[in-house]
Image (cartoon, rainbow, N blue to C red):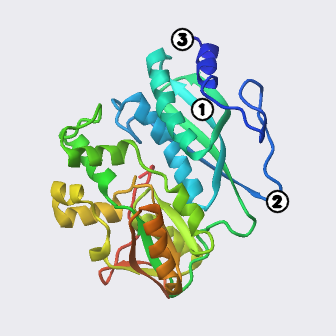
Amino acid sequence: MAEFSLIDRIRARTAARADIALGIGDDAALLQPQAGLQLVVTADTLNSGVHFPPETPAADIGWKTLAVNLSDLAAMGAQPAWCTLALSLPDAQEDWVDGFADGFFALADAHGIVLIGGDTTRGPLSLSVTAMGQVTPGTALRRDAAQIGDDIWVSGTLGDAAIALRAWQGGTLDVRGPAEDAQVEHLRLRLARPTPRVALGRALVGLAHAAVDVSDGLLADLGHICARSGVGARIDPACLPLSAAARARVGDTHARDAALRGGDDYELCFTAPPAKRAAIAGLGERLVLHLTRIGEVVRGQGVVADGSESGTTGYEHFL
């Protein structure tokens, strides 16, 4: 498929909207942000063999490509609005492009984010999204606003994606399609199709002080909050939310280690004053999402788990 045929194929999946004066098809897009709101911008790149196994289905790659960016917007409490997409493809096969678009636009449509442009080129499989959202000025959730005495919370369960990745690396997980075993399929989906907590992020505005999405591991990402806020964190590993699938696969000890250091969860970790506990519990019930209090913000620096300094060990690309 020729480059411009590929672009036309993707453009056919996009929708017109009043806040987009000019979308795909020109040198740049023209947008009309809502009056009185701040623009929130994030970018992530996914590379084959680094962020997903090379044999991952195209639809799963499309989903994850957008999901990791939506997770960043969620961590800021932003409402998703627009995105661009840059595709580097070794070749342009119609079936692959259509499958990628199926996954990408299924998630985009669910969160009201519209593709407005991008780029295509021949090269190793690599996908890059720049996502934009909007927030009311002064309300964005930031890493530098944690306060001593805050509770530390996480959403969902942690460690599942890391356990799935290790299973794939060990040849015991096939990522090419659904698994018959429900617990194995749970782990596969947590790796292939993470759920960006956009609704949670929006609802935490006014409740939480600081937030971050858990992409490189809880210790590393919570460590970012500590460093930016000039505080320390004390967490209880026994409180970490672990899925039944994770426990069954590797046992509690290894599941906790994956939760602390594994990454690729794309859950939210946030801090909030103890006075907000009831409101946060109610929020979890309303969103049908498990929210777990795992520790507190303290004086000092770094993250302490189970009484000992845990460092911020997590995934780093150039180590």
Above or below, comparing residue 264 to residue 298 in the picture:
above
Q: Amino acid at mark 1?
A: Ala
134 left or right, relative to 194 = right
Q: Secondary structure at mark 1?
A: strand
Q: CA distance from mark 3 to mark 1?
A: 17 Å
Give the crowd class for mark 1: few <14, some 14-19, many >=20 residues within 10 Å: some
Q: Amino acid at mark 2?
A: Gly
Q: CA distance from mark 1 to mark 2?
A: 30 Å
Q: Residue at x 31, y 58 (%)?
A: 159
Q: Amino acid at mark 3?
A: Met
Q: Position of residue 170 (x, y in %)?
A: 19, 42
Give the crowd class for mark 2: few <14, some 14-19, many >=20 residues within 10 Å: few
In the picture, which quadrant includes the N terminus? top right
Q: Position of residue 314 (x, y in %)?
A: 39, 60
Q: Earlier in the sequence, mark 1 or mark 2?
A: 2
Disc 3 designates what residue?
1
Nearer-the-camera pick, 12 or 87: 12
Nearer-the-camera pick, 17 or 236: 17
